[in-house]
Amino acid sequence: MKPMKRHPRLAQILLVCGLLLAFAAVSWSRIAGTEMSWQGWLAFALGCTLSLALAVVLMGLLFYSSRSGADEEASDQSVFDRRAARRPGAAPGARTGDGRPGAKR
């Protein structure tokens, strides 16, 4: 099954966004009274497309990281306490100025 048949709402949103972008680009060009070469239009289109692609990829990585549990260890305070307990002379749960627990000052 084609992806746009499974997500007709997404197809509609993308179509409206594309039309609005085209309208804005043409209106901006006419109001300013300047002409843009085909290289300018190509750069404009590539910039918009690559910026949107980067945003989509980064949001996808964010959701993947959240769902896979990869960032659970980073937010788990007990990990810091275990690392602090392994350092000689460090008080458990003690914090330093740089945010690391248990290091001597």
Image: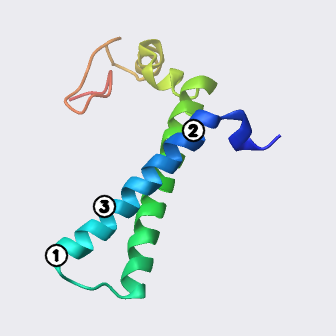
Circle on res. 10:
2
Q: Residue at x 44, y 70 (%)?
A: 45
- State the SS at label 2: helix
Residue on which the image places disc 3? 24
Mark 2 belongs to which amino acid?
A: Leu
Mark 1 belongs to which amino acid?
A: Ala
Residue at the farthest right position? 1
Question: In the picture shown, does residue 12 fall above or below 44?
Answer: above
Question: In the picture shown, does residue 97 fall above or below 24?
Answer: above
Quadrant of the rendering where the N terminus is positioned: top right
Q: x, y percentage for residue 76?
A: 46, 16
Q: Residue at x 41, y 62 (%)?
A: 48
Mark 1 surroundings: few (<14), some (14-19) or many (≥20) residues within 10 A: few
Q: x, y percentage for residue 105?
A: 20, 29
- Residues tagged 1 and 3 counted as in contact (Cβ below 8 A): no
Which one is in front in this view, the residue at disc 2 or the one at disc 3? 3
- Residues tagged 2 and 3 counted as in contact (Cβ below 8 A): no
Mark 3 surroundings: few (<14), some (14-19) or many (≥20) residues within 10 A: few
Q: x, y percentage for residue 70?
A: 58, 28
